[in-house]
Structures are given as C-alpha cells and as structure tokens.
Amino acid sequence: MAECFVLSSKKRSAGTEETDGDDLYKTKKSMLSTAAAWEDPAAALASARHEFGEHGGVNMSIEASATFTVMEPETMRRMFAGELGPDRDFFIYSRHFNPTVLNLSRQMAALEGTEAAYCTASGMSAISSVLMQLCSSGGHVVAARTLYGGTHALLTHFFPRACNITTTFVDISDHEMVNSAIVQGRTKVLYFESISNPTLAVANIPELSRLAHDKGVTVVVDNTFSPLVLSPARLGADVVVHSISKFISGGADIIAGTVCGPANLVNSMMDLHQGALMLLGPTMNPKVAFELSERIPHLGLRMKEHCHRALTFARRMKKLGLKVIYPGLEDHPHHELLKSMANKEYGFGGLLCLDMETEEKANRLMNYLQNYAQFGFMAVSLGYYETLMSCSGSSTSSELNAEEKALAGISAGLVRMSVGYLGTLEQRWSQFEKALSRMQDSGVFKN
C-alpha cells in the first residue's frame, strides 16, 4: 500500500488524482524532524493536523460511509494496486481506511511521537494484530511475566495453539534474564508493559530497547497505564499499543485500541494481501473515532489530576500504615527510574495498589469503600472519572495460575485502584477514612 498515509498535507478535489510528490516528501521530512525534537506529548498533539468539518465546522465531520466512490474507472484499479491511497485522500472501504478513524490515528501518532498509528475496535485486537504481523508460524516472543491477564492468555494459550508462536516469560527488571531468553534469529518481539498490570513495576524502556535492538528484535510496549506520563517511542521502543478504552477515553463507555509505530509497519498491517489488521478486520466505528478525537485534547488535564490524587492518596495511606504500592513514592524500587523517564509535570500514574494480604480482607475493604463510604466502585478497567477497584488475582489477572501469579508478584489480597477525580480530593479522602474506620471496628483489619 502507499507509504506514509498519515502524512497527507492536502485534500483531493473532485477529478484530481495526483498530488505533488515533492510536497508529500517535504511533509514527511517535516514530520520526522518534528518527531525527533518532540518532548511534550501535549505540545505534539497541538501541532498535529486539525481536521475541520465539511462545512467549516471547528470539529471534523463523521464519515459514516462503508464504501467510497471514484470519479474515473481507472482510479479504482490504481487504488487496489496501491498506487493511490489515503495519503492522497483516496479511500476504498472503511475496513481498510476511514477518514474519521484516520484522523484519530493521526492524533494517537502525535501523542506517542510515532510516524503513524492505526486505531482498532479494542486494545486486545491491537495487541494480537501487531504480534501476528511481526511473528510468523514458528516465531518466538519474549514477554514480561507480569501482564494484563488477557494478554498473558493470548501468549500462553492461543498463540501456541492457533499460530505456532511461543513465548518465554521473564522478569522484565532482570536484564540478564531478558538477554538470555532472546534467541537471535528466532525471537521476533520483546513485549512488556511500561507500568505493569497490576503490580505497577516500571520497565527500563531505554535499556530493554537497547538489548532487543542489539539482537534485531522489535520492541512492543503497552502504554495503557501511562499515556502522557511515559512516551515509550521516545525512549527507544519501536511500537506502542494502547487500550484506548481506559484513560484516553475516560468515560468507561467505549472499547477501542491503537497501534502506534513506524509508517512501514502500520501500512504493512493494512496491506490487502498480508495485513493483519486488514484481513482480521478489527475495524473501529467512525462514530466512536469521532467521540474519542473530541476527548484527547483534554487528556493532559485529566491525567494530571488522576496522578495528583493517586500520589496524595498513596502518601496518606502509607502514613496510616497500609502497604501501598505506587511508583510515585520514594520507597518504590522503580521510583528513580520512572522519574528519569517520565514526561515532566504529568506525575507518576493514576493507579495505586493496596496489598491487603488475603482476598478476604481485600474484598471486605472494597465492600466498605463502595457500599458504606461511597469512595468508589468495584469494577475492572481504569481511567474512569470515578475510582475503580478490583482484587486483581481473582479478576483481571485470573487467567494466570497460582505459580504464574507468584512469579508475577500478584498477592491474593492485592487491590488495584484506578483513582478518579470526581468530587473534591478531601471529600474522597474522608470517605476512604470512613471505610477504613469501619474495617478497624469490625476487627477484620488492624492498623
């Protein structure tokens, strides 16, 4: 397919099939030089192309068409041959490229500082598609032990059975183990989460990228927990994936994902004959893309408040004697690492964990927090404006067996909290203290 589809600098008018090749080249060079100098993701987003509405509206129009017409019969043949494509504003079919989804993809590429991006129907479709594009039958992946349960199940069970792709799981903080697990010539991907789900361990992205690249391995990083906080591509990663359903959406009402990376990779995933995204078809609805594109501009403000409250709560919980895991605390083993990699002023992430030791204590605390104090909701997912709580071992990490949970550092009583920003901080903290007091009075929890 035509290269650099995200770099289009002008629209096609009726009957026009060509754009100036020099213009396209200059646009590409300009974007690449911008990416090289890019530091603040919010600034990069503000500098990205803005798509106006059909009649001059400040917001883009929704292109709801499944298929697209051409002005001349020869144009369709050229589109299917890859001679004309979305980079020149030629569209075939919305499973391939859709203008509204493409605009959201441009925003995601700007946010992550990559050449290109493509938005999908879910985070898992983004992860599975990019891994299947990079790995063929007989391929090998090295992955972190601590991953979202769905990703772990994909690598442990589905890929070996359906694709003959195997995975070696490692302690991602043990770089010697990572290095030893990579089989040069066979290992295709090193996969990990920038901040791990649910243990909040922080990956050394620059060093891991160096190790992988020395052996010709592609680095794929799931940055769902830390949009804006970390920029894996700037730190050396090749591909960044997201579940947009979480912080980026912010409303717990949309399922979506994205792959951000080099233009040649993203375009290969959309190839008519060999592309994982094109042929598997996890297509994003353009109406969903429009909604998400309207939320991204205030993602920075939301993330700062999520992170501010998470840090404040973590510090106060620690003072109460609770076992808190949060990379913003100075006693977290990866605090200095995160501080060295993080984008300034966005904080240390919007999630914290409380280790209650047993599932019974974890469940009792969450019950009081929701049903007695109205502090938050017992629900999976994250990035919502209300605080969401779950006992990871029996929910989002339930796909791991007991041994795998032990290796991943997931205790039976680990409560993962996605800290919301609705209401005042002091109001929410008083609700937490109310629940904790009830728990102490019941004798189940002793301070």
Image (cartoon, rainbow, N blue to C red):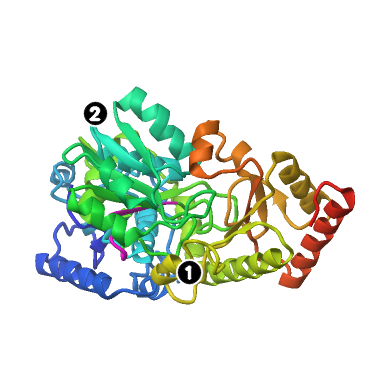
In the rendered image, residue 154, in percent from the top left (x then y), is placed at 42, 33
Callout 1 amino acid: Pro
- In the picture provided, is 288 more to the left or to the right than 261? right
In the rendered image, residue 436, in percent from the top left (x then y), is placed at 80, 57
Vertical arrangement, residue 197 with respect to residue 106, above or below: above
Residue 240 inside the magenta-drawn segment: yes
Q: CA distance from mark 2 to mark 1?
A: 40 Å
Tell me the quarter of the image containing the C terminus. Answer: bottom right
Mark 2 and mark 1 residues within 8 Å of each other at the beta carbon: no
Asked which quadrant contains residue 143, the reply is top left
Towards the viewer: 257 or 440: 440
Towards the viewer: 200 or 292: 200
Q: Which residue is mark 1?
A: 297
SS at badge 2: loop
Residue ID at (75%, 72%): 426
Q: Residues within 10 Å of mark 2 (few under 14, many from 20)?
A: few
Towards the viewer: 58 or 429: 429
The residue range painted magenta reads 234-242
Q: Which residue is mark 2?
A: 137
In the rendered image, residue 440, in percent from the top left (x then y), is placed at 85, 54
Callout 2 amino acid: Ser
Mark 2 or mark 1: name the one nearer the start of the chain: 2
Residue ID at (15%, 63%): 19
In the rendered image, residue 38, in percent from the top left (x then y), is placed at 31, 74
Vertical arrangement, residue 420 with respect to residue 395, above or below: below
